Image: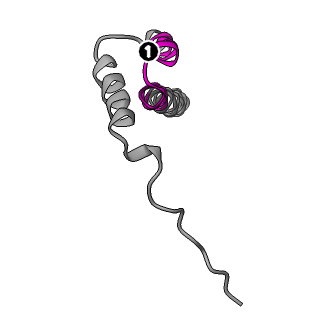
Amino acid sequence: MSLMTTNPAPGGYAHTPEYAAGRADAYDDAHHHTLDHLAARAALYAEHAHLLTALGYADRVLEMRMEHAAVSAAETELAHTDRVGGAA
């Protein structure tokens, strides 16, 4: 017996210019600010900018935090295995 999988309906806010502008702003700001500063700016966007712009900005900041956490975990694991292997 097989199950039918369905794709989500196309559309939504992810393809709006405001959402894309928020993501682009976060991408551009990431070259000059820390993640904590970007999170503070995302809060300002939430209070003062268009809702979809704020959502795009916050989504990109969250993605950057997850990328940073993944890289940090991988580098920590690599450093640990290099240290253990090199001690012999």
Total numbered circles: 1
Q: Residue at x 48, y 30 (%)?
A: 55
Is 29 magenta? The answer is no
Picture colour scheme: one colour
- In front here: 68 or 56? 56
Q: Residue at x 48, y 27 (%)?
A: 51
Q: Residue at x 34, y 19 (%)?
A: 30
Res 82 seen here = no
Prevailing secondary structure class for the magenta stretch in the rendered image: helix
Q: Which quadrant is the N terminus positioned in?
A: bottom right
- Residue 59 appears left or right of 18: right
Is 49 magenta? The answer is yes
For mark 1, what is the residue?
Answer: 38
Residue 82 drawn at (x, y percent) = 48, 31
Residue 52 drawn at (x, y percent) = 45, 32
- In front here: 48 or 84? 48
Q: In terms of image quadrants, where is residue 73?
A: top right
Q: For the residue marked with disc 1, what is the amino acid?
A: Leu
Q: In terms of image quadrants, where is residue 77?
A: top right
- In front here: 72 or 2? 2
Q: Which residues are magenta?
A: 39-60
Q: Within 10 angstroms of label 1, few (less than 14), some, or many (20 or more) residues?
A: many
Q: Residue at x 41, y 11 (%)?
A: 34
Element carrying mark 1:
helix
Residue 84 drawn at (x, y percent) = 56, 30
In the image as oriented, which residue stretches furthest toward the right?
1
Considering only vertical position in the picture, is 46 above or below 23? above
Residue 58 drawn at (x, y percent) = 48, 26
Considering only vertical position in the picture, is 8 above or below 34? below
